[in-house]
Image: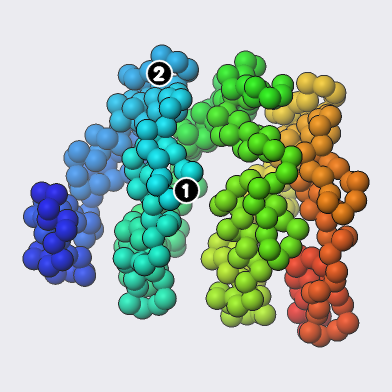
Amino acid sequence: MHQLKHETLKNLKCKQCDYTTNNKQCLKRHLVKHVSSKEFKCDNCYYATNCEINLKRHLVKHKTSKDFKCEQCNYATNYKRCLKQHLVVHKVSKDFECNQCDYTTNTKRCLTMHLLGHKISKDFKCDRCDFATNVKSAFSRHSLTHSTSKDFKCDKCDYTTSVRGYFTKHLSKHTLKHFKCGQCDYTTDNRRRLTHHFLTHKISKNFVCDRCGYTTSNKQCLQRHLVKQVSNSKELTCDNCYFTTNNKQCLKVHVLKHKSSKDLKCNRCAYTTINKQRLKKHFLIHKISKDFECDQCDYITNKERYLKMHLSMHKVSKDFKCDRCDYATNIKSSINRHLSIHNSSKDFKCRECDYTTSVQGYFKKHISKHISNDLKCDRCDYMANSKHYLKYHILRHNNSR
């Protein structure tokens, strides 16, 4: 079975699309995707499928009791596979190491994905554009962007897509909020989000930093905190500006900002970017119709995140409260920013002067004062040392037409 994966010649082909495989069972499973009617439907939500096994797996999501529980923390799940993956979190030693850098992990799959980052040649190349990758799932997702037919259609509105993940996410907008928090008014249609929300009410903090008094109930937050505590001097530095970081991935993303050629362009204005997500967000500026409306006032927007932030203004009770003063808010990022005020240690220090701060945003703004105004507007004499300010300035020219 495994050796079939390495065969280049695919004997079995789908008559309705370009799919090819060496496995007869895989072909059968694939053909089910082309069947328009769904025989098996969920009574609790909009989920429908042609595979009975998939329906059984899906119904577990609606189950309130958890069969598999972690003995070291409060984690519980109905999937044995998920419990195995979770137990790796508690493991101190790292079994899998990268032989090309310092990366270590407890998961073989994570190591395999990491090693692809060191590979120069790309195994999967798109024959319609310049896209290339070593990850098969990423290539499959990309191929759908060239597909003209939209296989997934919403029966509640005009939304259509060729990506199942996007379709599932869209359907959640039409469903009622099944999961509710017993301690506040929070509701969601996503069980994972509810689990993360529960942590905001948790008094005891399981994860403690052994270098300072920082405590949290979220492991990811502790890992991000430890990166800041590694050393006051940042190990990774950008060759083009003052940016420094301890995170290699953050440096890669930052270096792209200095790239002169912008591959992605807006067809309505002069906006260009190297980030596909940013281009999608930019398109919303030109959109006339507003999809998200506030049911308490006249506020409308194209971004769901903005609507959520706006709705918090109407909320009387405050979900996030500071334990050192009377400050309270409904926005998590605001409470995090506020807590840094009480932090006596200043993690961010300027190399050009004596300025120190515990807030990264304030530090970035300060550094811009030491950088010369090398960004110029091609329509007037305006100069800036921040790309963000220049973009807003250019929009003034576009709006004044």
State the SS at label 1.
loop
How crowded is the residue under tag 2: few (<14 C-alpha within 10 Å), some, or many (20+)? few
Q: Which residue is mark 2?
A: 70
In terms of sequence position, does the residue under pointer 2 or pointer 1 come before the other? 2
Residue depicted at x 74% and y 63%: 241
Spot the residue most to the right: 354
* Number of other residues with Cα within 10 Å of mark 1, as a class: few under 14, some 14 to 19, many 20 or more: few
Q: Position of residue 16 (x, y in %)?
A: 18, 69
Specify how the rendered protein is coloured: rainbow
- Depth order, front residue of 359/186: 359
Q: Which residue is drawn at the image coordinates 55% and 62% (left, top)?
A: 277
Q: Which mark is residue 245?
A: none
Badge 2 marks a residue whose secondary structure is: loop
Image coordinates for residue 398, horizontal then vertical, percent: 76, 79
Q: Quadrant of residue 329?
A: top right
Type of the residue with mark 2: Cys
Q: Position of residue 230 (x, y in %)?
A: 66, 36
* Residue occupying the point 70% across, 66% down: 240
Q: Is residue 163 above or below residue 181?
A: below
346 with respect to 247 (left or right): right
Q: How many marks?
A: 2
Q: What residue did someone put label 1 on? A: 101
